[in-house]
């Protein structure tokens, strides 16, 4: 499906918005400290010990991102493997999936609140690093633990992934979403002090990000229900042929 290529841009954007959302952004520093086995004070200064701690945090961050990326990629491949079923029953599943996504979008817009989407898991900073394997496992847990929170966005991407029976398409689409979350996470590990300053300044905009996510989800849900998403994708490919080369 050529029009599906356009959705890689959307998946990447959705990943970045998920990272900036109230679900993820506030917990980035504690997670980095947890998987690196350090405190924020341990990362201040320019001594050899501090530099070693920074390298440990960065390495753990990469392993952590690979962990939750693995889960998302497998979810994407699984959705694509169900592609034939979704395609054959699109006239039934489309309105249902679209309606659910609209409801979840209204949650983000604040029309009403769904308590399950506020569920989260927090870790306490420990004195010893969990190691690269441990960081990878924590990344796996992160993907499952935060699925209710990022679930509305994930559901929309999974439905699109399921529209193509090729597992590689679904895996790469969800992998792109994971990159949207993972790259900022790793960048935060490289410059945690600067990230903390950014987070404090950006806090005032988190509500706006949530509203943007909600609006995009409502629009996506409506397009899925009406079949308009495919039409827009093909129109964009015709209007901007270079987009067809993405993905």
Image (cartoon, rainbow, N blue to C red):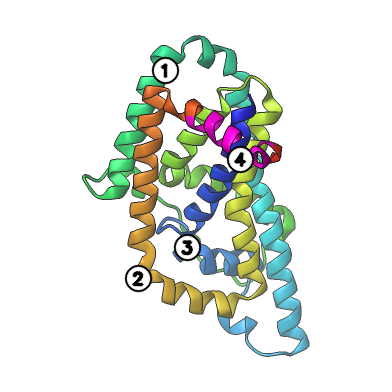
Q: Quadrant of residue 143?
A: top right
- The N terminus, quarter of image: top right
The answer to whether 95 is drawn above or below residue 179 in the figure is: above
Category of crowding for the residue at label 1, using alpha-carbon neighbours closer than 10 angstroms: few (below 14), some (14–19), many (at least 20): some
For disc 4, the marked residue is 240
Helix, strand or loop at label 2? It is helix
The answer to whether 21 is drawn above or below residue 92 in the figure is: below
Left or right: 113 in relation to 212: left
Give the mark nearer the N terminus: 1 vs 4.
1
State the separation of the CA atoms marked 1 and 4: 30 Å
The answer to whether residue 68 is seen in the rendering is no
Give the mark nearer the N terminus: 3 vs 2.
3
Disc 1 and disc 4 in contact, CB within 8 angstroms: no
Give whichever of 152, 68 is nearer the camera.
152
Helix, strand or loop at label 4? It is loop
For disc 2, the marked residue is 204
Category of crowding for the residue at label 2, using alpha-carbon neighbours closer than 10 angstroms: few (below 14), some (14–19), many (at least 20): few
Disc 4 and disc 3 in contact, CB within 8 angstroms: no
Give the mark nearer the N terminus: 2 vs 4.
2
The answer to whether residue 82 is seen in the rendering is yes
Whether residue 233 appears in magenta in the rendering, the answer is yes
For disc 3, the marked residue is 25
Disc 3 and disc 2 in contact, CB within 8 angstroms: no
**What span is in magenta?**
232-244
Q: Nearer the viewer, mark 1 or mark 4?
A: 4
Category of crowding for the residue at label 4, using alpha-carbon neighbours closer than 10 angstroms: few (below 14), some (14–19), many (at least 20): few
């Amino acid at each position: 499906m050529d029009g599906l290529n356009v959705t890689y841009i959307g998946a990447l954007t959705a990943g970045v918005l998920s990272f900036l959302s109230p679900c993820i952004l506030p917990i980035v520093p504690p997670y980095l400290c947890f998987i690196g086995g350090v405190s924020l004070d341990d990362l201040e200064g320019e001594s050899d010990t501090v530099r070693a701690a920074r390298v440990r945090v960065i390495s753990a961050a990469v392993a952590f991102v690979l962990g939750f990326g693995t889960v998302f990629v497998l979810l994407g491949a699984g959705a694509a493997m169900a592609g034939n079923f979704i395609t054959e029953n699109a006239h039934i599943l489309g309105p249902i999936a679209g309606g659910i996504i609209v409801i979840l979008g209204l949650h983000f817009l604040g029309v009403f609140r769904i308590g399950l989407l506020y569920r989260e898991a927090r870790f306490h900073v420990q004195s010893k690093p969990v190691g690269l394997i441990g960081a990878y496992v924590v990344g796996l847990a992160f993907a499952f633990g935060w699925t209710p929170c990022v679930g509305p966005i994930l559901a929309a991407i999974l439905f699109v992934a399921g529209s193509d029976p090729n597992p590689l398409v679904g895996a790469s689409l969800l992998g792109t979403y994971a990159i949207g979350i993972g790259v900022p996470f790793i960048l935060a590990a490289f410059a945690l002090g600067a990230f903390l300053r950014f987070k404090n300044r950006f806090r005032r905009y988190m509500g706006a990000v949530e509203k943007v996510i909600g609006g995009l989800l409502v629009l996506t849900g409506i397009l899925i229900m009406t079949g308009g998403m495919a039409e827009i994708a093909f129109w964009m490919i015709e209007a901007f042929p270079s987009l067809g080369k993405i993905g």
